[in-house]
Amino acid sequence: MLTPNLDRFAKDAATVTLDQSYVQQGVCSPSRNSFLTGRRPDTTRVWNFKRSFRDLSDGESWISLPQAFKKSGFVTSGMGKVFHPGEPKNNDYPASWSADFEYFDPAVDKCNASYAVSGEGWCAADWPDADFTDGKIATLAVERLAEYRRRQNTTTTRTPWFLAVGFHKPHLPNAIPLKYLAMQPAVERVAITPNAFFSRSAPPVAYYHCTNMENKTERWDIDVPVPDGLQREYRRACKPLPAPVWNNPRTCAS
């Protein structure tokens, strides 16, 4: 995967890189509710997309990660997919975010007939990065950093700040600028795994399958191999996922 900006950022002496960071659950909202509260999914009681930790009887008293900074005197602002959309409601504003900046949550790219090419779970069009969801987030993140710096340089009281930038990728759909697709191999050249079956030793929760972001608890069939074509499409689609992160000269990290 081509990630020159991330690589450079990770190697900076001032950067803290988490090299052994594991998901709490293989589903978006539960992992975010867990990570941002420091509690396991069995404690947050969030295993799907039906509620958030704030819905618990004592959830309003819990302190989220950005909220901890806010309570410590930081100006906190966020954008993109930090919490799962709607879980908590309104991206947990005002509990987690300061009133200085409105939370930026642009519409998510959707693959449709307007894209030049498409495949299983991905699509590409000859549009600039800034026309895509993550490109919009990256652009505003740079502007927000500049605003923080301006404030630091023009006020006698330097208020500390916290900025959460949540890029949507690698979440589906993988809508990308067409120029990044040219960096990838032809789909027929993408390698596939020699064992296309799911592990029989993994716990049942590992096979939770969310269909089109609906709250349907389905399971992958462990007796049916993942089709070769589907493997190739997904592996190829996954390679250009962080397009705005790769080559946008203003972007440093996700």
Image (spheres, rainbow, N blue to C red):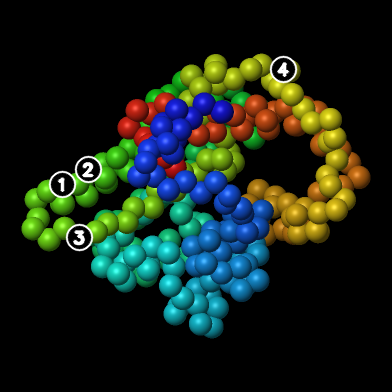
| Disc 4 versus disc 3: nearer the observer | 3
Q: Which residue is mark 2?
A: 146
Q: Residue 189: which disc?
A: 4
Q: Nearer the viewer, residue 116 or 120?
A: 120
Q: Residues within 10 Å of mark 4 (few under 14, many from 20)?
A: few
Check whether the beta carbons of the residues at disc 3 and disc 1 lie within 8 A of each other. no
Q: CA distance from mark 4 to mark 3?
A: 52 Å
Check whether the beta carbons of the residues at disc 2 and disc 4 lie within 8 A of each other. no
Q: Secondary structure at mark 4?
A: helix
Amino acid type of disc 2?
Answer: Ala
**Residue 254, percent across and down?**
44, 42
Q: Earlier in the sequence, mark 1 or mark 4?
A: 1
Q: Determine whether 59 is above or below 192 in the image.
A: below
Q: Nearer the viewer, residue 88 or 61?
A: 61
149 relative to 211 in the view: left or right: left
| Disc 3 versus disc 2: nearer the observer | 3
Amino acid type of disc 4?
Answer: Arg
Q: Which residue is mark 1?
A: 150
Q: CA distance from mark 2 to mark 4?
A: 43 Å
Q: Determine whether 240 is above or below 171 in the image.
A: above
Q: Nearer the viewer, residue 185 or 201?
A: 201
Q: Residues within 10 Å of mark 3 (few under 14, many from 20)?
A: few
Amino acid type of disc 1?
Answer: Arg
Snapshot quadrant of residue 170: top right
Check whether the beta carbons of the residues at disc 1 and disc 4 lie within 8 A of each other. no
Q: Residues within 10 Å of mark 2 (few under 14, many from 20)?
A: few
* Residue found 12% across the figure and 48% down from its top: 153
Q: CA distance from mark 2 to mark 1?
A: 6 Å
Q: Earlier in the sequence, mark 3 or mark 1?
A: 1
Q: CA distance from mark 3 to mark 1?
A: 12 Å
Q: Which residue is mark 3?
A: 159
